[in-house]
Image (cartoon, rainbow, N blue to C red):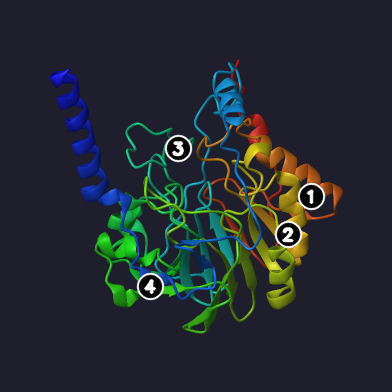
Amino acid sequence: MMSVLFIISALILVAFLVLRFYPVFGQKPSRDRVSRSPQHVDGSFRNQIPSPMGTDLKTAGTMFRDMLKKDANRKPESALPINEFPVSHQPQQKTNITWFGHSASMIEIDGKHLLLDPMFGDAPSPFPWFGNRRYSKKLPFRLEELPVIDAVLFSHDHYDHLDYGTIKRLKGKVERFFVPLGVGGHLERWGIEPDVITELDWWEDADFQGITFACTPARHFSGRSLNDRNSTLWCSWVIKGTDATIFFSGDSGYGPHFKEIGERFGPFHLTLMECGQYDPRWASIHMLPEETVQAHQDVRGNLLIPIHWGAFTLSFHEWNDPIARVTKAGKGEGIKVITPMIGETVFLHEGPHPQQKWWESIPKVD
């Protein structure tokens, strides 16, 4: 009995030390930093409308059942093809967007380099050597070759969006970080100076060298460890330059906030809209692909690039189901859905825009 108690005590101590000192977990924001937000209620952030996620035993049982399914095609049979991204230290003067898989993207607008949710690690996990690996096996560029990034925008603090290793490697390359309330604490723990971090609440905006960044609502949640659920805010972003207005959804379930964003800031030349990692059991925090198209219409978007797919397995659907469904739904609604390969640059105001179904050439797991 004493041996058992000793082992249990040792495990508890190890868990405490990991949670307390392992830097990947980041740090909770001070209450003074977040408590004045209208979104912060009873000690945590809330969505605009109730957003339940199934946590009962029956739901857990169905998830365990789905996890054991064989031949589910949740990962591609081979590494996804990528376009080698030609890194340039002089940004294009014509607005363009390059998708790097999942939600990570670069925008060149008004002569500035912007990165959105730059998760460039191998696996979205606090312990990446145990995580599921990136489909493409590698990035379309070497991180060390990136130019100085004028601004980085993060939508929330989950591991598939905010990556400790990426931040450490980007340190010194970024002029300014724009994040929702509380997320700056993680960056500060990782060595980013507070004076280059701008935290915003929903409906707040900031001017950055002639570009406006507006922090807008999303329907999601946050947290990086066992005791920080919803301690930081999550958001979407409006990016308004001189000749383009772009909407970046971050992670979000479908909700009335999309129409409100469209009324305040639309129309948009382009939307980068999440379409993957969904499941009916958590539809309140991740849209189904058909809802992605509806959200694009709600914000009054023109062109649509689907994101949040093509890099990692974080749900039970087939890996290419999101893009197949969102392109089908978009066609049915007369929406122009752009489907670049990973690393392929899209010039916003110049066609033809890529619409090839390149994912169909990837062999299916037998």
Position of residue 5 relative to residue 218, above or below, is above
| Mark before the other along the chain sequence, 2 or 3 | 3
Task: Say which residue label 2 marks.
Answer: 296
Q: Nearer the viewer, mark 2 or mark 1?
A: 2
| Mark before the other along the chain sequence, 4 or 3 | 4
Viewer-nearest residue: 269 or 123: 123
Q: Residue 330: which numbered mark, if any?
A: 1
Quadrant in the picture for the C terminus: top right
Viewer-nearest residue: 97 or 134: 134
Q: Is residue 279 visible?
A: no
Mark-to-mark CA distance, 2 and 4: 32 Å
Mark 4: few, some, or many residues within 10 Å (few <14, many ≥20)? some
| Mark before the other along the chain sequence, 4 or 1 | 4
Farthest front residue in view: 1
Task: Say which residue label 3 marks.
Answer: 134
Task: Say which residue label 4 marks.
Answer: 33
